[in-house]
Image: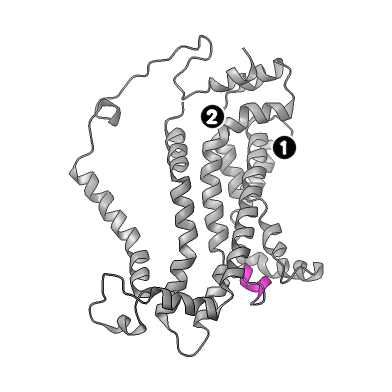
Amino acid sequence: MSVMQRARAVPGTGIDSGSGKPVRKSRKRGSLVDGRRPGFLTYGILLAFLIGSAYPLWWSAVMGSRSNEALGLDWPPLLPGGNFWTNAAEVFDTVPFWKALGNSILISGTITVSVVLFSTLAGYAFAKLKFRGNGILMVAVIATMAIPTQLGIIPLFMVMQRLGWTGEVGAVIVPSLVTAFGVFFMRQYLVDTIPDELIESARMDGANMIKTFWHVALPAARPAMAILSLFTFMMAWTDFMWPLLVLGSSNPTLQTALSQLQSARYVDYSVVLTGAVLATIPLLILFVLAGKQLISGIMQGAVKG
């Protein structure tokens, strides 16, 4: 059996690695696999969480489509008004919106690809490769997560200043090319997903380290990679403090550009909320396009083994 055929025989797929026949799994009484649907209480709780999560965004969209006077009403309106595009035009005229949007897409996209690639490689090495100091190095990686990010901002800014990178998007991208959380997340996922026997079989078939990773580890890691990419993109997209310090107002990201809407003495909150909604739309589009892969990845990780 080839490497690709063995790679498909991963635990959790319901297929026996020896015979290739489906394996029956026992079903517990009272679980969803028995056909019992959730009751009204479950749907009620989910609906309450959905409304509570979506209401702030809806309220921002409603207020952003009205004038600033609507915020002073005793009962704020629940339906959008007709001033959204007027407020959006004011956002475009006040801040360099399109330049900031391009910077945010470039920074978030580059960081996401880099973090997912390097985290998957490092996670596979920590999970399946036997080398001296494996456990100590993993503990050191996890220990870096306990250090607050704010403690490293001043020395990191001094380094970027000496390199002459201040004001450049590279100063935001390079320090975030890999994260300790990404390495830890991929390591925890791969350590149980890929059996050691599968890797040994690939090596017996003549596959080197790169081919083993590409044909065995990478297909098994795709659900976790999808989850990590979504969360990494979201964190990079909403990052505010470090881009504000190192980029300034001359070459801003979308989040730092929108902060300029409230720099005047009089703050038009309807315009500020319109900018917040415009900055959220790309994230919503991303979650709509990648939501199916995200859910499938969570479900595969929940039922593996």
Say which residue appears at 56% left-offset and 72% top-offset: 97
Q: Is residue 254 left or right of residue 71?
A: right
Disc 1 versus disc 2: distance between alpha carbons?
Answer: 23 Å
Mark yes or no: residue 253 visible: no
Q: Are marks 1 and 2 in contact (CB under 8 Å)?
A: no
Is 49 placed left or right of 105 in the picture? left
Asked where in the image residue 221 lies, by quadrant, the reply is top right
Relative image position of residue 256 (x, y in whole percent): 57, 72
Q: Which residue is mark 1?
A: 133
Bounds of the magenta span?
A: 243-248
1 above or below 77? Answer: above
- In depth, the one of 201 and 99 nearer the eye is 99
Nearer the observer, 176 or 66: 66
Q: Give the x, y percent position of residue 41.
A: 20, 46
Q: Which residue is mark 2?
A: 193
Q: Quadrant of residue 78?
A: bottom left
Q: Residues within 10 Å of mark 2 (few under 14, many from 20)?
A: many
